[in-house]
Image: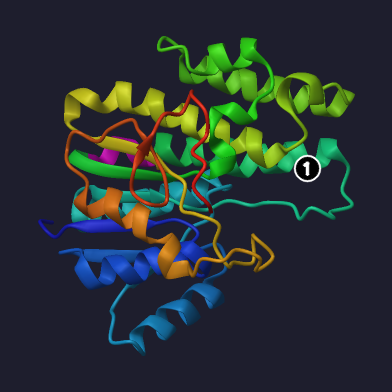
Amino acid sequence: MSSKVAIVTGSNKGIGFAIVRGLCKRFEGNVYLTSRDVRRGEQAVADLQKEGLNPKYHQLDITNAKSVEVFRDYLKEKYGGIDVLVNNAAIAFKGNATEPVAVQAEQTLFVNYFSTLSTCEILFPILRDGARVVNVSSSAGHLSNIPSKRLRDRLQDPTLTISELSGLMRDYVEAAKLGTQAAEWGNSSYVVSKVGLTALTKIQQRLLNDRDIKVNAVHPGYVDTDMSSHKGPLSIDDGAQAPLYLALDAPDSVRGEFVWYNKKIVSWADDKPTEKY
């Protein structure tokens, strides 16, 4: 029951895979690689074992509450709690996707915001005091990407609740269905989902602060992955650096922050950093 444990969601490939690799090298405890597809997850574990690393594996589909509950119960029985949780699982439609905006909005927000939120609601009760949570956001998750000042002010309101934030995310999906989203929200469902995740990070930190739990959002950089159509200039191991910093190395004073790929804390509300990637 005393062994420490770290979890990375959506980690059979890409940045999540590299975060597992980095944790296996440095985290003093067990590291769980998770995936929706068991075969792909077990193959990813085998690939890391060839490197002399020893991740554990558990099936996890963040869009399925039952899957998350099964994993929670397993972790609670085997370890008694969670020490590090990296919320990495996400989707993104390609720029040339033919699905209607309404479909893209509903599916992107369902996975990247609502399913991440439900996963947190199921797993957070077993976070150990002092645990670290890393929400993998994006440069797309910077507040400056939202055109409407009214919405920007609302999203950074220090009294905003999770319920109210979820209401705003639902408002976006409904606007997308009506075709009226662009003026206030912009044209990217991915942007809205990651802005929502970053706003959620701020609220989660407020709620967990008295338990010394650190919750931060991170932009890992523009990485060469399936999600970026392999256009990103950074390797997956480059993209894992800032998430690993937050999971393992950041001072305890770093909490509720938005951290850039170079490990620097950036202002979420002011102008977006001009550094590349």
Residue ID at (41%, 29%): 267
Residue ID at (85%, 21%): 180
Looking at the picture, how far across and down is residue 54, in whole percent?
A: 28, 78
In terms of depth relative to the viewer, which is nearer, 20 or 82?
20
Hey, which residue is sitting farthest front in the picture?
274
Query: Which quadrant holds the N terminus?
Result: bottom left
Asked whether residue 124 is drawn in magenta, I would say yes
Q: Is residue 220 above or below residue 206?
A: below
Looking at the picture, how far across and down is residue 134, in whole percent?
A: 36, 45
Magenta stretch?
Answer: 123-127
Residue ID at (74%, 37%): 106
**Type of residue at label 1?**
Gln
* Residue 266 image-quadrant placement: top left
Q: Is residue 34 visible?
A: no
* Residue 132 image-quadrant placement: top left
Hey, which residue is sitting farthest left in the picture?
2
Q: Residues within 10 Å of mark 1 (few under 14, many from 20)?
A: many
Residue ID at (20%, 67%): 26
Q: Is residue 266 visible?
A: yes
Left or right position of 101 against 89: right
Left or right position of 90 against 207: right
Label 1: element kind: helix
Q: Which residue is tagged 1?
A: 104
Looking at the picture, how far across and down is residue 177, in whole percent?
A: 85, 28
The dominant secondary structure in magenta is: helix
Looking at the picture, how far across and down is residue 35, in whole percent?
A: 50, 64
- Label count reads 1
Q: Is residue 235 above or below residue 126?
A: below
